[in-house]
Amino acid sequence: MRRLRRAMLAATLAVAVAGGALLTSIAGVSFADTAAPATSTGGGTTEISAHRTAQALTPDGPPTITCHIDANPPGLAVDGRVGASSFVTCDFPVASIELTMRVQRSTGAVVVVDHVVVQGVSGTGTAKLSSSCTSFKFSEFTNFSIAAIDFPAGYEPAFASIQDSSTEGLGPVICILG
């Protein structure tokens, strides 16, 4: 069952990154496992909790594991490149975390994409800059981030995703060649 859930999430992430479905996170649409809905805490952080069942392999594990995602607003580096960072933290180690971050300009142009997969940890993060400087007067950039979390055996839901986004107006940027 875990393989099926992972395959479903992998397909969801691929479609989201390739087709722009992450834009739905602004409208609050969840395109992940709806058995355990994510909730916004109002500060741009989204969280999900899994509860231990009688079949838990780690009987000494906590009754609940809670994970948070933060998609920080995009910013400008000194050299004019756009960058952003995203982080996932859980209060107990989980089987795996798959984090995808995508920074998109208001024109629709994707300027940064990063993908991180870690196993057996309680958190991960990514920070990345665009590959080159692009001159512009002013533009809004949005960091769309989604994380798939595979909880330890014996926790329900066994698999869920959380998402967050943040937008920042940046500019002007004048790139100096040379």
Image (cartoon, grey):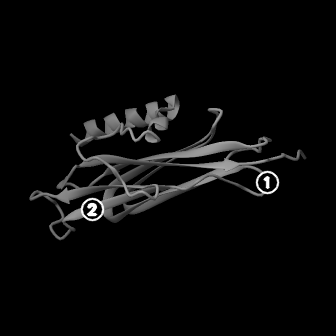
Provide the secondary structure element on which disc 2 rests.
Answer: strand
Percent across and percent down for residue 11 are 38, 32
Residue sitting at 70 percent across and 49 percent down? 170
Structural crowding at the residue carrying mark 2, measured as other residues with C-alpha within 10 Å and reported as few (<14), some (14–19) or many (≥20): many
Which of these two is toward me, 113 or 29? 29
Give the labeled residue for mark 1: 79
* Numbered marks: total: 2
**In the image, farthest residue toward the right:** 178
Q: Position of residue 51 (x, y in %)?
A: 19, 58
Q: Secondary structure at mark 1?
A: loop
Task: Locate residue 75: give its quadrant.
Answer: bottom right
- Which amino acid type corresponds to the residue marked 2 in the rendered image? Ile
- Looking at the rendered image, the quarter that the N terminus falls into is top left
On the rendered structure, is 25 left or right of 161?
A: right
Q: Position of residue 79 (x, y in %)?
A: 79, 54
Residue closer to the observer: 161 or 41: 41
Q: Residue at x 32, y 34 (%)?
A: 8
In the visual, does 116 lie left or right of 35?
Answer: right
Residue in view at x 46 percent, y 34 percent = 16
Sequence order check: which comes first, mark 1 or mark 2?
Answer: 2
Q: Quadrant of residue 93?
A: bottom left
Task: Give how far apart the Cα atoms at labels 1 and 2 are.
Answer: 41 Å
Depth order, front residue of 98/167: 167
Res 47 label: none
Few, some or many C-alpha atoms within 10 Å of disc 1 (few <14, some 14-19, many ≥20)? few
For disc 2, the marked residue is 65
Judge from the rendering whether residue 1 lies leftward or rightward of residue 48; answer left or right. Answer: left
The answer to whether the residues at label 1 and label 2 have Cβ atoms under 8 Å apart is no
In this rendering, the answer to whether 148 lies above or below 14 is: below
Estimate the x, y position of residue 53 in percent, counting from the top left: 13, 57
Q: Amino acid at mark 1?
A: Asp
